[in-house]
Image: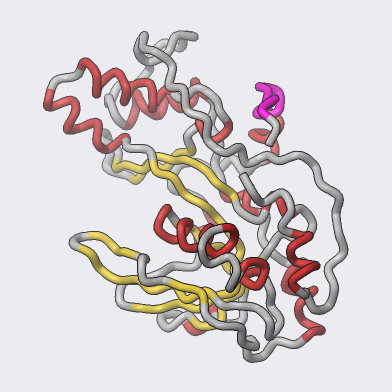
Amino acid sequence: MSSSFTSSMFDSIKSALTKNTEGSNTKFKDYLKTEVGNTYTVRLLPNVKDPNKTFLHYYSYAWNSFADGKLINVISPTTWGQRDPIAEEGYRIRRNGTEEEKDKARALNRKESWLINVYVENDPVRPENNGTIKVLRFGRQLNKIIMDAIEGEDAADFGPRIFDLSPNGCSFRIKVEKQGDFPTYVSSKFALPKAVVGLNADSYDEIYNNIFDLESYLTVKSYDELKETLNAHYFCVSDVEDNDEPVAATPKITTTPKPVVAPVVEKKAVPASLDDDSIADLLKGLED
């Protein structure tokens, strides 16, 4: 993966993505919603036009505003290797803040997430989703299971099959259980190859070619815009004078997250039925 990411590239990404206001993402209905006590069966869908964009890996923050209580959900610029005023402020507080400030700053914990398109085989809570394409948002637990199937200890059994809609493909069973006060997904697993009810070779192309543009689900803000959000909804300060300085004069966070932008790859046509070799070709570039 190239490391020559520039600010101008970031500006291009920002201008191309949806600029929704906080909490007003009308695309929420496109997400597959999972609830504790249920098992959801899906097939992961590759981006056949640009395999590098099959997954969207990003970092974000979510907290209830200390000013008005509404949910604040913003993307961290560290997703693209850019400076992040929220991360800088959190670092300052953890290093120099009082115990009370540190306790409050837990609201600013950064979350790592991934997005991928899925074909829903069985949604036990919302059966109307069956036979449709949804966006699956997941965290580290499901990511570990998926990565083990792609290139880890389970790769020999699954590999390209986890992206195949044909009878040679393997479905993903997402089991949602409760651990303490939080859901856990550690019991999720890929199933043995089996045909998807209602699908045939004529329907594969239509599904593969109608996935959602994952980048459109991110609301991107500039460094200064994030400072304004932090001041208004964390410090409860309004009408802050704009300046070019960071929230606090602290060392820059030096994280190197996986960029969401990958080198342009040659677009490939999708066969009516994907075999292991053809899907393996499509998966080139998916690796970090």
Q: Position of residue 250 (x, y in %)?
A: 36, 12
Q: Could you tell whether 226 is left or right of 232 in the image?
A: right
- Point 65% across, 72% down: residue: 161
Q: Could you tell whether 237 is left or right of 28 in the image?
A: left
Q: Position of residue 220 (x, y in %)?
A: 56, 36
- Point 19% across, 28% down: residue: 102
Image quarter of residue 99: top left
User: 60 or 64: nearer the eye?
Assistant: 60
> In this picture, which residue range is highlighted in magenta?
3-10
Vertical side of 183 occupied by 123: above or below: below
Image quarter of residue 19: top right
Q: Could you tell whether 153 is left or right of 266 in the image?
A: left
- Point 65% across, 78% down: residue: 169
Instruction: Assess whether residue 4 is covered by the magenta stretch.
Output: yes
Quarter of the image containing the N terminus?
A: top right
Quarter of the image containing the C terminus?
A: top right
Q: Position of residue 278 (x, y in %)?
A: 80, 67
Vertical side of 129 occupied by 147: above or below: above
Q: Residue furthest bottom?
A: 197
Instruction: Assess whether residue 204 is covered by the magenta stretch.
Output: no
Q: Could you tell whether 89 is left or right of 224 in the image?
A: left
